[in-house]
């Protein structure tokens, strides 16, 4: 007989037993296998008597057989009682004599929660929308030209996009702080590499001019000595060069990859690329809105074991990213607590999505999967090769299927809520603000 008791909201404890006869056959089989290769003084491999094998390897074989028997017994009981087990059980063998006729044990484990999706009808959502304009195309052309700009010395006052060379001294309470001094220091105005207030102070200065101004560093500034504090800078401008943009002609168009130099083809390609990237970013933003709404209306406990697994995954991803950036991580481990909040959210969303997909039949259709792959492939020189690359690997196809599932859930959620369209700001959407 077996019984299941409730320990907490999701934690359960199974109490059961295994007859010794269910283990002995497996022990004998394991000893026979060990005997084929075991090396003992005075015996040839494969010729060691059963009693001798039992003497040397019996405990090991019995322990391994018991472990397998516990797993089988637990799986059988869980299936018969229709338990939705989350994670792995922790076994506790109650019988002191492992050779007793019956081995009593308990298994502590978690079950999946019941996920009941609340109503979205009372929720308000803003769906970001955007249509690429000719101005966006023109601005991108200007950016491309700026990337290929040449510079020439000018005598006018410095302005944005100029290359400048300065001396500067920064003082905190009358003393030069660490990193607060530089000579013949290059500053590209408008690049954002210096603090905005610092660059703004250079704009309008002429060569040979010296200026002093006060500036307050943000609280989050990496230099702890000056973070959140007001300092005084003195700047002397030595050199100004203004950008000279290349003409938007056939020669320029050829330099960016359009072989025949047709300006209209370059504009079409830019518009196409911007449209794809805008669509991708809108999907990400709108998915976040829909998922936050689903989290808000659906409350349930999350299995700790699943959160721990997800935390481990996030930690490994973080270490991998650090390694990709050239950092030496070796056997470094990061505290799982750092990832707990994000892991909990991801586990919750996974369970919510599974419930919504099943309940409302939002499974990914083959044509949706093909369409998404085709859409993604358009950004490559040989789209058909990309399509074949996906089709050749079931894991890659599954990734696309999951993306379609998410899109289906987002569409469903926004259809249930009070959803209004909100025009996006291009620079904010593209991260150029």
Image (spheres, rainbow, N blue to C red):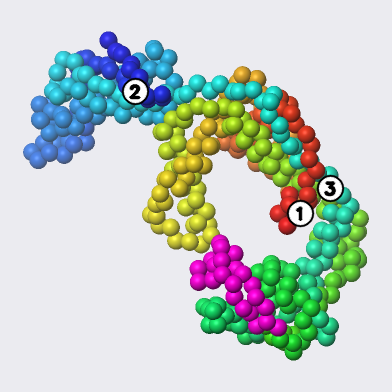
Residue occupying image coordinates x 91% and y 55%:
264
Q: Residue 220: image x %, image y %?
A: 56, 62
- The range drawn in magenta is 211-234
Q: Is residue 358 visible?
A: yes
Precedes in sequence: disc 2 or disc 3: 2
Neighbor class of circle 3 (other Cα within 10 Å; few <14, some 14-19, many 20+) is some
CA distance separating discs 2 and 3: 57 Å
| In-front residue for pair 255/406 | 406
Q: Secondary structure under badge 2? A: loop
Q: Mark 3 and mark 1 in contact? Answer it, CB < 8 Å.
A: no
State which tag comes first along the sequence, 3 or 1.
3
- For this orientation, the residue located farthest to the bottom is 208
Which of the pair 206/320 is nearer the observer? 206
Q: CA distance from mark 3 to mark 1?
A: 12 Å
Residue 283, given in percent of the width and then of the height, sits at 71, 40
Q: Residue furthest left?
A: 42
Q: Is residue 87 above or below residue 226?
A: above
Q: Which residue is mark 2?
A: 7
Task: Tell us which disc is closer to us: 2 or 3.
Answer: 2
Point out the residue furthest to the top here.
1
State the CA–CA distance, disc 2 to disc 1: 53 Å
Q: Can you identify the residue that label 1 sits on?
A: 427
**Can residue 5 be found in the magenta stretch?**
no
Residue 294 image-quadrant placement: top right
Q: Position of residue 421 (x, y in %)?
A: 79, 37
Position of residue 16 in the picture relative to residue 189 (left or right)? left
In the image, 350 versus 50, the foreground residue is 350
User: Which of the labelled discs sits on residue 61, or is there none?
Assistant: none
Give the residue at mark 3.
132
């Amino acid at each position: 007989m077996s019984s299941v008791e409730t320990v907490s909201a999701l934690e359960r404890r199974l109490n059961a037993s295994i007859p010794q006869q269910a283990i002995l056959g497996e022990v004998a089989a394991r000893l026979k296998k060990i005997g084929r290769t075991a090396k003992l003084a005075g015996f040839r491999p494969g010729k060691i008597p059963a009693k001798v094998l039992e003497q040397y390897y019996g405990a090991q074989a019995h322990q391994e057989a018991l472990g397998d028997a516990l797993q089988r017994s637990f799986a059988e009981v869980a299936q018969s009682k229709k338990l939705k087990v989350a994670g792995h059980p922790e076994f506790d063998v109650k019988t002191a004599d492992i050779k007793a006729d019956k081995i009593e044990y308990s298994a502590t484990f978690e079950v999946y929660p019941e996920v009941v999706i609340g109503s979205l009808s009372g929720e308000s959502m803003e769906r970001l929308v955007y249509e690429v304009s000719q101005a966006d195309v023109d601005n991108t052309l200007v950016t491309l030209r700026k990337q290929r700009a040449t510079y020439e010395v000018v005598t006018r006052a410095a302005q944005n996009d100029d290359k400048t060379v300065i001396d500067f001294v920064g003082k905190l309470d009358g003393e030069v702080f660490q990193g607060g001094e530089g000579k013949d220091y290059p500053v590209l105005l408008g690049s954002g590499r210096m603090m905005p207030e610092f660059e703004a102070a250079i704009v309008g200065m002429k060569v040979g001019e010296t200026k002093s101004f006060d500036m307050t560093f943000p609280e989050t500034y990496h230099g702890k000595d000056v973070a959140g504090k007001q300092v005084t800078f003195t700047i002397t401008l030595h050199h100004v060069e203004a950008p000279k943009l290349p003409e938007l002609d056939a020669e320029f168009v050829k330099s960016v990859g359009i072989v025949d130099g047709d300006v209209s083809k370059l504009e079409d390609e830019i518009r196409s690329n911007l449209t794809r990237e805008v669509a991708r970013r809108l999907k990400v933003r709108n998915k976040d809105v829909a998922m936050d709404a689903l989290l808000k209306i659906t409350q349930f406990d999350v299995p700790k074991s699943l959160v721990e697994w997800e935390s481990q995954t996030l930690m490994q991803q973080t270490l991998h990213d650090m390694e990709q950036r050239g950092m030496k991580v070796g056997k470094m481990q990061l505290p799982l607590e750092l990832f707990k909040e994000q892991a909990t959210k991801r586990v919750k969303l996974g369970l919510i999505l599974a419930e919504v997909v099943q309940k409302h039949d939002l499974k990914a259709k083959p044509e949706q999967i093909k369409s998404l792959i085709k859409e993604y492939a358009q950004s490559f020189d040989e789209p058909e090769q990309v399509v074949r690359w996906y089709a050749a690997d079931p894991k890659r196809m599954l990734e696309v299927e999951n993306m379609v599932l998410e899109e289906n859930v987002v569409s469903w959620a926004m259809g249930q809520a009070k959803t209004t369209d909100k025009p996006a700001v291009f620079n904010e959407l593209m991260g150029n603000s």
